[in-house]
Amino acid sequence: MRDNEPAPSVSIVIPVKNEAGNIAPLVAEIERALAGQSFEIVYVNDGSTDGTEAELASLKASRPWLRQIKHAASCGQSSAVRTGVKHARAPLVATLDGDGQNDPAFVPKLLAVLTENPRIGLVAGQRVGRKDTGFKKFQSRIANGVRSAVLRDGTRDTGCGLKAFRRDLFLSLPYFDGLHRFLPALVRREGYEIGYVDVVDRQRGHGVSNYGLWDRLWVGILDLAGVWWLVRRRKRVPDATEIG
């Protein structure tokens, strides 16, 4: 972006690892969904070893609003999302997974809910008609149930990649690996409200999932305990006004 060029109104952040076959179709869908808006797409290449880097470079040649940030080695989904948000140029950020399961057509609706009320800090997509395997859906159902019971975050599905939030708020949250699965509780901790939009889930476009399930199980239990502690220890957010 040139120095005299205005910042986009929204940054679309997409973490990817070895998703070369899904990039071009998703970029085209986002372009159609956000036609008429000022936007940028920030792909975070999380240590891919396939043709992801070359595919993004090829698409970028004709799309000045497409950017690629590369991790030298894979650091995980939460780290990739944070990298993308840090590099984003817009005050509002929307995220979605890079495998094609999240439909970009829902992004404008998420943004509309986010901007209609300044007290809303996060709008979370809530999947309906999930296309995952039975085992993965069962695991998610258990994980969401336990998380909701412990944190009381009012969210039935934190695993959906479709989210929209305020960039400055996101960067003020305590960071840890796995952060993206606890955003509703952490945003409520900061005194903001959460908006929800039902989104239709789709089949993965190409390839297989690159972020495993087994490693998230035990780490997720530790993360849940940590977030519970953070929420419990948060004092009332001061409403401060300078006088005189």
Image (spheres, rainbow, N blue to C red):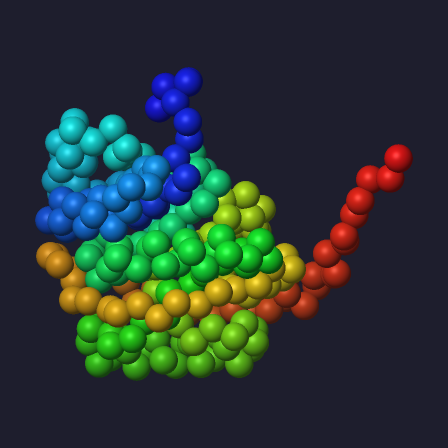
| Residue 195 x/y as whole percent | 48, 65
Q: Is residue 180 visible?
A: no
Q: Is residue 52 above or below residue 58?
A: below
| Residue 20 x/y as whole percent | 14, 45
Q: Is residue 205 visible?
A: yes
Q: Which quarter of the rendered picture does the C terminus lie within?
A: top right
Q: Which quarter of the rendered picture does the N terminus lie within?
A: top left
Q: In this view, does 163 lie above or below 25?
A: below
Query: Which residue is pictured at 16% across the width and 46% down the height?
Result: 28
Query: Which residue is pictured at 41% across the width and 18% down the height?
Result: 4
Left or right, 121 with reference to 92: right
| Residue 84 x/y as whole percent | 38, 41
Which of 57/7 is in front?
7
Query: Which residue is pictured at 33% across the width and 55% down the height?
Result: 107
| Residue 242 x/y as whole percent | 82, 40
Left or right, 95 with reference to 185: left
Left or right, 51 with reference to 114: left
Q: In this view, does 4 lie above or below 128?
A: above
Which of 143/196 is in front?
196
Q: Residue 90 occupies which quadrant of the picture?
A: top left
Taking the view exactly as shown, the residue that stands out farthest to the front is 36
Taking the view exactly as shown, the residue that stands out farthest to the right is 244
Number of dots carrying numbers: 0
Query: Which residue is pictured at 20% across the width and 31% down the height?
Result: 63
Left or right, 115 with reference to 94: right
